[in-house]
Image: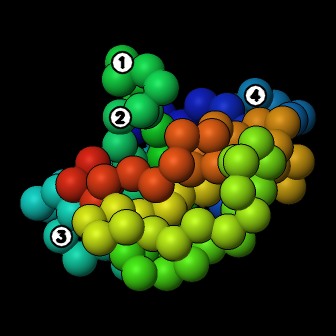
Amino acid sequence: MRVIGRSMDPFLNKDYNTSRRKDIVAVKMWRAGEDVKRGDVVVFRSPLDPEIIVIKRVIAIEGDIVRTRNPYPLKTQEISIGHVWVEGEHLEYERWSRDSNTYGAVSHIMAK
């Protein structure tokens, strides 16, 4: 999978700003949602546009309470059963990442 964009910078695409180079990652496929843990990097279809595959880090799992960021309407959110909270890693977060702070928690079935 070719990683395009700044959302996961600096973990992926650390030279994106200077070279426009794109990282390529191998995606290990297993049964969707199986053993998804905090800290995992996952890929899934964007809830905003199913034609786009996104890559994000799992920040919280079911039962966790996460401190949200803009533009999410609440300051904290408890993660529902069967869902995970995902975020990009870019330092200018609100400007570059569309993640759970934009579309809420995602079903762990979507995360691979």
Q: What amino acid is found at the position of numbered circle 2 in the picture? A: Arg
Between circles 1 and 4, the one closer to the viewer is 1
Q: Decide which of 93, 10 is in the foreground and name it.
A: 93
In which quadrant is the C terminus drawn? bottom left
Q: Quadrant of residue 5?
A: top right
Check disc 3 and report the residue beneath it: 34
Check disc 1 and report the residue beneath it: 51
Q: Which mark is residue 20?
A: 4
User: Residue 18, position in %: x, y?
Assistant: 88, 34
Which residue sits at x=41%, y=81%?
63
CB within 8 Å, label 1 to label 2: yes
Please indicate, yes or no, whether residue 102 appears anywhere in the rendered image: yes
Q: Decide which of 112, 66 is in the foreground and name it.
A: 66
Q: CA distance from mark 2 to mark 3?
A: 17 Å
CB within 8 Å, label 1 to label 3: no
Sequence-first disc among 1 and 3: 3
Q: Helix, strand, or loop for circle 4?
A: loop
Q: CA distance from mark 1 to mark 4?
A: 23 Å
User: Residue 2, position in %: x, y?
Assistant: 47, 34
